[in-house]
Each structure stands twice: as structure tokens, then as C-alpha cells.
Image (cartoon, rainbow, N blue to C red):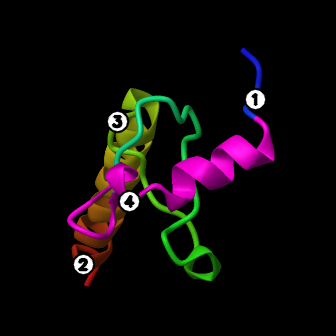
Amino acid sequence: MENPPKETLDKWHKDPNNWKFGGIYYNKEDKRILPPKRIKWMGWTVNFANTKSVLFFITMLIVLLALLYFSNGTN
């Protein structure tokens, strides 16, 4: 699979049709796991149109919740 050129990535990022409710990134063509947020210096976001990206998000959420749950049980 070939990576799209930077111009294409920038075009996708700037396209308002790829941002739902102003901040949720949804682009079926973009295969990146963590694309940049709408304001790039703020970090990365999840591409909710990419199954791998959503699975990564759910896995990280489960790990975080498990850490919180088990860390409270040690007192």
C-alpha cells in the first residue's frame, strides 16, 4: 500500500466534509491510525472511518480503564 503524498493528506485535513460535528475526523480514504487533530499542534485524533484506528482507540480506552480500576483496588 502506497502512502498518499503530503498534498493529499493536507487536502483531506482541510476538507470540512471530513470533520463531523466540528471535531470528529471521518475519512474512509485516510488509512492512518492517528491523523493530526484539526488544530495540528494539539496532537492526534482517531479516524472513525478507519477500523484499525477505532480498534486502537478502544484498546487504549480498555487499558486505561483497567489501570484505573486495578490501581484503586490496592489500598
* Quadrant position of the N terminus in the picture: top right
State if disc 2 and disc 4 touch (CB < 8 Å): no
Q: Amino acid at mark 4?
A: Pro
Q: Amino acid at mark 1?
A: Asn
Was residue 13 drawn as part of the magenta stretch in this picture? yes
- Label 4: element kind: helix
Residue 26 in the image, given as x and y percentages of width and height: 35, 45
Q: Which residues are magenta?
A: 5-24
State if disc 4 and disc 1 touch (CB < 8 Å): no
**Numbered badge on residue 72:** 2
Q: Residue at x 34, y 36 (%)?
A: 49
Position of residue 29 in the picture relative to residue 40 (left or right): left
> Real-space Cα distance between discs 1 and 2?
43 Å
Disc on the earlier residue, 1 or 4: 1
| Residue 66 or residue 39, whichever sits in front | 39
Mark 2, residues whose alpha carbon is within 10 Å: few (<14), some, or many (≥20)?
A: few
Q: Amino acid at mark 3?
A: Ala
Which residue is label 1 attached to?
Answer: 3
State if disc 2 and disc 3 touch (CB < 8 Å): no
